[in-house]
Amino acid sequence: MSAEIISGKDLAQELRLNMKQEVEELRKEGITPQLTVVLVGDNPASKSYVKGKEKAAKEVGISSSVIELPATIPEEELLQLIHKLNQDKEVNGILVQLPLPDHISEQKVIETINPDKDVDGFHPVNIGRMMIGEDTFLPCTPYGILTMLKSRNIQLEGKHAVVIGRSNIVGKPVGQLLLNENATVTYCHSRTKDLRNFTTKADILIVAIGKPNVLTAEDIKDGAVVIDVGINRLESGKLTGDVDFESAVSRASYITPVPKGVGPMTIAMLLKNTIKAAKGLENR
Ligand code: GUN
């Protein structure tokens, strides 16, 4: 058996096409969604992600601007800028690209963003709303994963979902979203003993470890759905996931590739959140 590959690239493209039409309609009502991205320092990976976000925003007609700041900017100055953006009526969505330099508290920055402009879905208010199942901005990668699963009508209710990784950006929220869909959720992480004991019992396996090719077919239950969140660059320059794709593809029922898997979906969901922000609270 060979798994069906869920192409995040194709699904994201389809979503962008739909969003483009939605933005055209909004423009007729005088609303142009606006996303402001703040980039601190010159981390090459961050720069590249921000470029990808700008390009995608442009494609769907979302107005975007990038504010580039030096790595030496004092925390207080960054917080002042966020206050200014919070008050700017032209700005619907604010995204501060992470990671930030060590002298700046990421949590302070996240908590300074107005929750109604928090298109990353990282503000504690939005995380709280998500936990209690209220409509809100969902963190983009977990939201993208859920959208991929739903695109194939993969049943979640009553299924055993195993999440490997417990970051605030991916692991914790994706587990919560799956719980909201009535899955039974197990979290594994770097201190988990006998990881295979858990992964082989997963109907749905979400892998966000951050190390290349950790899981192989032997770690996967026959017919499981495997979502690979990892993006690792090998010495050869090749991008690879946390899952050994060639091995896992023979065991899973569905699998996401790397690249062209979860990555493009993350950006598509950011655009979705920006449109949601532009439509405003009253339209939630
Ligand atoms: N750095 C890596 N992923 C993300 C993300 O989704 N949002 C932000 N703001 N920074 C990131």
Image: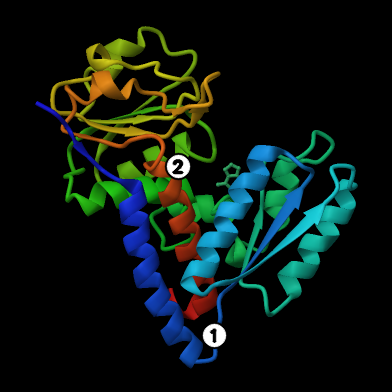
Q: Residue at x 54, y 38 (%)?
A: 168
Give the colouring mode of the picture: rainbow
Q: Residues within 10 Å of mark 2 (few under 14, many from 20)?
A: many
Q: Considering only order in the chain, which callout, 1 or 2, is on the residue closer to the N terminus?
A: 1
Where does residue 218 sit, x and y in percent of width and height?
23, 11
Residue 276 in view here: no
Amino acid type, mark 1 = Ile
Asked if residue 105 is positioned above or below residue 90 in the image, the reply reads: above
The residue that label 2 is drawn on is 173
Where does residue 27 sit, x and y in percent of width and height?
50, 87
Residue found at the far bottom of this picture = 29
Q: Residue at x 40, y 78 (%)?
A: 22
Residue 76 in view here: yes
- Dot in front, 2 or 1: 1
Amino acid type, mark 2 = Pro
Apparent side of residue 66 relative to residue 55 in the rendered image (left or right): right
SS at circle 2: helix
Apparent side of residue 51 relative to residue 106 in the rendered image (left or right): left
SS at circle 1: loop
What distance separates the C-alpha of mark 2 from that of mark 1? 30 Å
Q: Splitting the image into four quadrants, where does ligand 1 fall?
A: top right
**Which corner quadrant holds the N terminus?**
top left
Q: Residue at x 38, y 55 (%)?
A: 133
Q: Residues within 10 Å of mark 1 (few under 14, many from 20)?
A: some
User: Image quadrant of residue 195?
Assistant: top left
Apparent side of residue 100 relative to residue 128 in the rendered image (left or right): right
Q: Residue at x 30, y 37 (%)?
A: 256
Where does residue 198 sit, x and y in percent of width and height?
29, 17
Residue found at the far top of this picture = 194
The residue that label 1 is drawn on is 31
Numbered label attached to residue 241: none
